[in-house]
Amino acid sequence: MFLVCGEALFDLYGSESEASLVFEARMGGSPFNLAVGLARLGQDCALLTGLSSDALGERLSQALRREGVDGRYLRRRQAPTTLSLVELTPGGAPAYAFYGERAADRQLVAEDLPALGAEVWGIHAGSFSLVAEPVGSSLLLQHRREAGRRLLTLDPNVRPTAEPDLDVWRRRVFDFLAVSDVVKASEEDVALLYPGIGAGEVARSWLEAGVGLVVVTRGAEGAEAYGGFGRIAAAAPKVDVADSVGAGDAFMAALIAGLAERGVRCRAALAKMGAEEVLELTAFAAAAGAATCGRRGADLPRRGEIEGSG
């Protein structure tokens, strides 16, 4: 089983008429999307998050159950569900405004961290749950505790509207890097964290910090991967873009699923991967991200919907 950790929320998409502003609510949050994406790719997975006991929290719980995501690590709270107001640019890129002060998914504390059995082979942390408190410190504690025992993955997914102080992001990402095995970041993440420094230079510095595999996504241009094998670049299939919401989460889900299918469930196995195998894996993940861009919202693909799957 793979354990995903972080926020679960509702994205609100607004449409404006002359007399009113109407919102369509969709379930989301990068870790929530990732857990669903893994389940859709046939991976046993669970989500560790604080989940509201309100009606929205119950809908999130029911959706996870329908998708086949294990709910044993959901921690219910008498607190509101985070809401995210989403605006799409003309090119389909999302911009987010978060409303989550004292919300349930931020309230995970150290006492909520589960004692994990041998069936849990990997753990993921990412997005604004890295920097929101107390959840951020709790997830860092878990990553540090499980380092060397399970495969640890990280996706910074930097959201300045959730935490505008980029120094907070830099410090927290650095702390997670020190114990993470696989890191996926977008070009936008890298530019926000380290303006003026190329993605390749940043990726190599992360390898020097101890990460085993670094993948930098480049939108329609595909992705680059860095590791002991050197550097590879994988193209992404061309699609008619509806929007890019959830594309990074689909990429990460396919990356983790691909590692699992290849038996790469520990750091030692990760270190043995060669350039050709990493290229195949990265291309599969890029195809998953592209498939998500072809439809509205974070509607992550199943295996048969990914070009070149197999």
Image: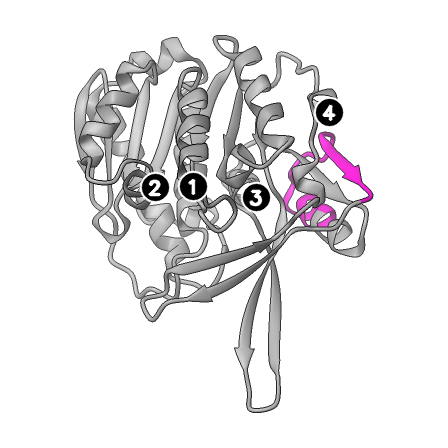
Whether tag 3 and tag 1 are in contact, CB under 8 A, the answer is no
Q: Give coordinates of residue 100: x percent, y percent.
A: 64, 50
Q: CA distance from mark 1 to mark 2?
A: 6 Å
Quick check: can you spot residue 145? yes
- In the picture of the structure, the residue carrying the numbered disc 4 is 112
**Residue 99 percent coordinates (x, y):** 62, 55
Q: Residues within 10 Å of mark 2 (few under 14, many from 20)?
A: some
Q: Above or below — where is 63 with respect to 191?
A: below
Evaluate if marks 1 and 2 touch, with contact meaning CB atoms under 8 Å apart. yes
Residue placed at 62% from the left, 17% from the top?
119
Q: CA distance from mark 4 to mark 2?
A: 29 Å
Instruction: Report which residue position mark 2 lands on.
Output: 189
In this picture, residue 222 sits left or right of residue 168: left
Q: CA distance from mark 3 to mark 1?
A: 17 Å
Residue 204: image x %, image y %?
A: 22, 23
Disc 4 from disc 3: Cα separation? 22 Å
Left or right of 31 on screen, residue 69: right
Q: At x 35% / y 37%, what residue is drawn?
A: 185
Gap in Å between the C-alphas at discs 4 and 1?
Answer: 24 Å
Depth-wise, is mark 3 or mark 2 nearer the camera?
A: 2
Tag 2: amino acid: Asp
SS class, disc 1:
loop
- Secondary structure beneath label 4: helix
Mark 3: secondary structure = helix
Crowding near the residue tagged with mark 3, few <14, some 14–19, many ≥20 C-alpha atoms within 10 Å:
many
Q: Between residues 56 and 120, which one lies in front from this camera angle?
A: 56
Mark number displayed over residue 36: 3
Q: Which mark is residue 157?
A: 1
Give the mark toward the camera: 4 or 3.
4
Give the magenta-colored segment's residue range: 61-78
